[in-house]
Amino acid sequence: MNTPPTLSRIETAPGPRWLRWVARLPLSWLRAAGTVLGAVLYLVATRRRAVVRRNLALCFPQASPAQRRCWAWQAFRHFGLAFVDRVWLWHAPPAVVARRVRLEGDWVALSEPGPQVMFLPHFVGLDAAWTRLTQAFDRPWATLYAPQSNSTLDAWVRRGRGRFGAPRIVSRRDGVRGVVRALREGAAVCLLPDMDLGAAQSVFVPFFGVPAATVTSLPRLAAAAHAPVIPVVARLDARGYRVWVGPAWADYPSGDDEADAARMNAELQRWIVETPGQYHWLHRRFKTRPPGAPGLY
């Protein structure tokens, strides 16, 4: 059996002392704090709660209202857990990260040289996956980044995501040129293209049977770099996280952007139905509508 690597040779400074102290608290205490945060958000973020419930009603019309309410609460609770977990992901000793975030699946392929494109969808554990992968594999890394509106939070997130491996973190505002350059240099690039980013460079393909504006960056960048597409799915559990690295998709990209976007959504659906409460339903996934279609929010 292969044993995953544990520590990257490159690590940035661990951050403020008080965060390092908090990061050493028992995981059960931090998870309790995350549950409280999720409960507060669930109670006060009424508009976002309505978005979550609408998404679940659109994607799971066959589920009972009680089941969808349960998933809605789980979405907020897991959001709170994952937010607090960033403290130990980004400030605990590296050995703690390696122990709590376990790699599963075909992770050995990530050691191979050459460009690779990771499909890392918006499950609550995405930061755990990114942190562990950049820690474990000593190779060039890059990802696109959506800047936060709060400057303090933005600085913390950027620093945290850059903790291991000196990755290239490219702002969405700067476009994809930095990502393309990283791929040409043989980097592994993590993409999160499962959000509604508007009609530009998107196609409308089904997501749980609902037409959804879906960007085609995953197949286009993979084709431009002649890189395999490797799915990565992170699951939160009582011990920390399980990060599953799947085999590279066969015959992808196909050259048909619409078909490739539809396949991406179909693969994502399979993973979501396993743990619906761990997906990022707080985003208005269906806000961009096909021409003439009514709004859904």
Image (cartoon, helix red, strand yellow):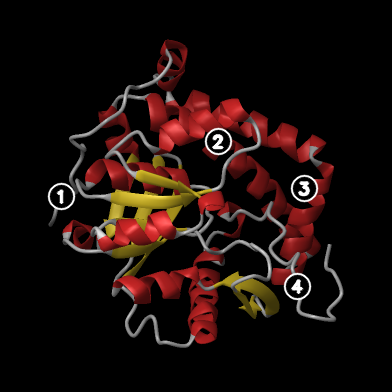
Quarter of the picture holding the C terminus: bottom right
- Residue labelled with disc 4: 61
Asked whether 204 or 120 is in front, the reply is 204
Left/right placement of residue 119 relative to residue 269 reads left
Measure how far apart labels 4 and 3 are at the Cα level: 19 Å
- Residue labelled with disc 1: 3
Kind of residue at disc 3: Arg
Up/down of 82 relative to 90, above or below: below
Residue 60 seen in the current view:
no
- Residue labelled with disc 3: 48
Kind of residue at disc 4: Pro
Which labelled disc corresponds to residue 68? none
Of circles 4 and 2, which is in front? 2
Asked whether 71 or 184 is in front, the reply is 184
Local crowd size for mark 3, using a 10 Å CA cut-off: few (<14), some (14–19), many (≥20): some
Secondary structure of the residue carrying numbered label 1: loop
- Residue labelled with disc 2: 83
Left/right placement of residue 158 relative to residue 294 reads left
Kind of residue at disc 1: Thr
Of circles 4 and 3, which is in front? 3
Local crowd size for mark 1, using a 10 Å CA cut-off: few (<14), some (14–19), many (≥20): few
Measure how far apart labels 4 and 2 are at the Cα level: 29 Å
- Mark 4 or 3 closer to N-term? 3
Measure how far apart labels 3 and 1 are at the Cα level: 41 Å
Residue 279 seen in the current view:
yes
Measure how far apart labels 1 and 2 are at the Cα level: 28 Å
Give the percent coordinates (x, y) of residue 266. Answer: 53, 77
